[in-house]
Image (tube, rainbow, N blue to C red):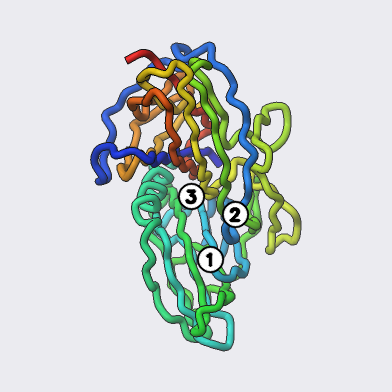
Amino acid sequence: MGKNWVLCVAVSLSLLVSASAFAEQSTVPVSSLQPAVHLEKPQLAAVGGKLLFSDSPETFSAPGAFYRDTAEGEFRVFWHHQNAAPQTMTVGVAITNTSAAPVNLYTKGKGVGTDIYVDVAGQTALADFMQSQNTVDLAGTLVPGESYFVTAPTGSGITNSGIVQFAATAQSGAPAQVTATFLAYDAKPDHPEQVAVLPEDSHTRGTFPHFDRTGTIRYDTSLGNAYLRVDSAAYGQWSDSMPGEYEEGWDAVDQKTVINNGNYGVMYRFAAEFVNSYHHPRMAGLFLNPSGGYGHYVVKWNKTIFQSGYLTYEDAWNIVNFKLNPNGGTYRSEMSLTGGAAGPQVIYFTNEAR
């Protein structure tokens, strides 16, 4: 699957607006940011509930299930599938109460995107997820055997990308177990948990222990231009991954261990510590370069969600410029990868005299 990385940054300063907006496209050649220093890689901690990941078969031509597994308490689902059938199908996920008692099912962020351009589908899904991830909504109280669907009609040649975070609880409030089935159908099934699973392709499906990573990025203005790769390959000659970035997962359908290469659906929650060694105000800049290829991206800065235009591996998107005080500052940032654009992504930090 192509990769669409999204950088979401929220800073602990009082900046501008809090609505969702399209950023005015501002790019420079990535070569203009080089040479740059490789930042020290942060040690990442894996936190949060399970991540259920569905990208196999990525392209399908018949109804069926893509992946199925159980989850309990709080968990996140992520999918990316392209309809190669001649007819429109409905694509998404069904959460089924397979227990003997009622289950309260909540959503804590939900985004689904459909588009002929795979990276635009991913951009839409992640932007909507970011917009809603701080809200908790009761999807419903599911009686035993009942299912809740998050789906969208998906025409021929259209890609459907989705990211949703759920919480399942018993009536007592304790974590409850449910069954998640990723699927495509032309007639809505009464029992999605019984739909036969399609054979895998060369892509990945599986369940991973945690849906978030946390860590601290440290940047000193004395470094000048500096960069850090996020979602670099998990292994091999192109790997520049951070310690703790990847976890081994389990494919519950094919009964084997798997790696989510790129950490699709994982939210990176960083603290970004800026040290201003010049001890006078500087103008800092944040850029994103899709070094692996191309795509459309989403950035959240303070409470504003920005969406880029089309970027190539030669571009560096100037996400934001901000005043850095003489004593520096600490920022909060989030990054996530979604389907449809190539990676890895490289973030650049710059600074200059005001």
**Rounded to the nearest whole Å, what is the CA distance between mark 3 and mark 2?**
30 Å
The residue at 25%/38% (across/down) is: 16
State whether residue 255 is above or below residue 13.
below
**Res 47 label:** 2
The residue that label 1 is drawn on is: 74
Q: Quadrant of residue 25?
A: top left
The tag on residue 199 is none
Asked if 288 appears above or below 90 in the picture, the reply is above
Residue at 40% in and 53% down: 129
> Spatial distance from mark 3 to mark 1, Cα to Cα?
27 Å
Would you name the residue on which mark 3 appears? 82
Q: Amino acid at mark 1?
A: Glu
Does 83 appear above or below 135? above
The x and y percentages for residue 320 are 35, 29
Kind of residue at disc 2: Val
Query: Label 2: how many residues lie within 10 Å, few (<14), some (14-19) or many (20+)?
Result: some
The mark that comes first in sequence, 1 or 2, is 2
Secondary structure of the residue carrying numbered label 3: strand
